[in-house]
Image (cartoon, coloured by chain):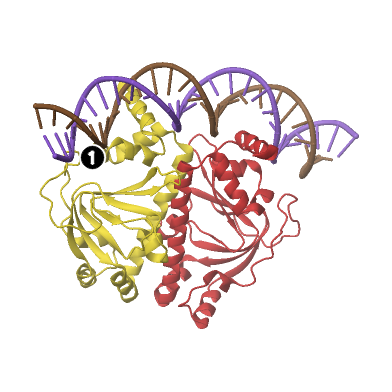
Chain colours: A yellow, B red, C purple, D brown
Amino acid sequence: MGTSAELHSEKAGTYHSEVLSPVRSVEDFYQHPELAPGDLEQIARAHEYQQLSKGTMLLQEGQHANAYYCIGSGMVRSFATNPSGKDITTGFTCRGQIAIEVASLFLGVPTKENFQTLSDCQVWKIPLISFHNLFNQIPAFASWGREWMSQALLMYKLRALRMITETAKDRYLRLQQEQPELLQQVPLKYIASFLGITDTSLSRIRKEIARGN
Amino acid sequence: MGTSAELHSEKAGTYHSEVLSPVRSVEDFYQHPELAPGDLEQIARAHEYQQLSKGTMLLQEGQHANAYYCIGSGMVRSFATNPSGKDITTGFTCRGQIAIEVASLFLGVPTKENFQTLSDCQVWKIPLISFHNLFNQIPAFASWGREWMSQALLMYKLRALRMITETAKDRYLRLQQEQPELLQQVPLKYIASFLGITDTSLSRIRKEIARGN
DNA sequence: AAAAGTACTTGCCCTATGTCAAGAAATCAA
DNA sequence: TTGATTTCTTGACATAGGGCAAGTACTTTT
């Protein structure tokens, strides 16, 4: 379970078998009406393709993020550590999504989150400096970035709102509906802390649902 | 309590008396190392100064946001309405902060949030189209925007995390410490729903704290 | 000054979820 | 294969916070 990216991936974890087909190209991550094909090529060239084995840490608490990752296949978990030592899952990044610690990357502060692969992953990595250059050279890329951030902001706002307005069971059912593959691939304790409850409670909620809501 | 901005503000509400001195200039909102004085002048010219009376709706659920507001004095509350009809306070925007519905403004979708002044306010309003022009014409403005979004994203992530890791009392004490003026100026029910609890519970938490933690 | 409305508190009881501990089942290590 | 580890479930009990209703104080309206 090293900190560095490793290049072999013979053995897929029994838990986290790959179901979905991988994203074909890094250009798929940068869909935006203003981005011309030439722009996309330039953007793509700024990424480095990597295969990461299960358990790889992409970023650890206290470090400064200096890159982000477009996830072609596999899954990444991000988590923060409580003062009392427990880790709280803050999110899952799946195939087709971008694993990034915005605060550390763009504000230059040490991160309070950890990012770790839950399975073998294929990713495209782009360094901050390359991002920065693209941002300044390609206006449409900056627009893409603004939209991506808007979308991300919306999701976190919704998450906070839902922690208030929905019960734990509601949140689990929503997750089940919106990301069913996640429930198969991720250990219950991570899902529980992501939902804001204990694994004990989630187990009971599952039982209740199994009996027929 | 109209939808449009109004220009008189003789009578300050008894509840929400102004304590803090207003922000002097709109340029204070756009501090960024790369922004030159000339840029700031251009940015400032894109804003319109307005005085809004207490109760003014800046944005209502279902509308499309087409501007945002830099708050020079006063306070704005944003809230979402539950399916069951209750309104949940999603945030307070105070002097020196920006009242904006990012999702609606930048993704062009109808907003699910409402924005309403809690007191008479002095604001600088900037239309989306002007923002967009500045974003494309002034690279440093785009950088400022990216940083602002990063900061906002961080705060919403923290909010979601704290809803999970902290008790309601913890959250109240934090608010008391970080924004004491807010507790004086805002009715308890709005603070309660912002904290994710009922006004009844917040009242009890206050009592408990008053007795000596 | 009376009436109506709003803000806040308090009591009683209830539910969702947490804590702790034990045990079964699956997985991993050797 | 065997033992160790992890995952998940379940029970008994505790606690935070919600729902409802009443009551007080303050504010606004008339």
In the displayed orientation, state which residue is furthest to the bottom: B38
Q: Which residue is rendered at x = 59% and y = 44% of the image? A: B172
B161 horizontally vs B172: left or right: left
Describe the element under mark 1 as helix, strand or loop.
Answer: helix
B119 horizontally vs A196: left or right: right
Q: B54 or C7, which is in the foreground?
A: C7
Q: D15 or A193, which is in the foreground?
A: D15
A189 horizontally vs B73: left or right: left
> How many labels sit on residues?
1
Image coords of residue B38 (percent x, y): 51, 83
Quarter residue A23 falls in: bottom left
What's the amino acid at mark 1? Answer: Gln
Image coords of residue A73 (percent x, y): 19, 51
From this view, report whether residue A1 is shown above or below residue C5.
below
| Residue pointed to by mark 1 | A185
From this view, report whether residue B44 is shown above or below residue A114.
below
Chain under numbered label 1: A
Image coords of residue B6 (percent x, y): 65, 60
Q: Which residue is rendered at x = 32% and y = 28% of the image? A: A206
Q: Residues within 10 Å of mark 1 (few under 14, many from 20)?
A: some
Q: B55 or A142, which is in the foreground?
A: A142
Q: C9 or A120, which is in the foreground?
A: A120
Quarter residue B69 falls in: bottom right
Image coords of residue A3 (percent x, y): 25, 56
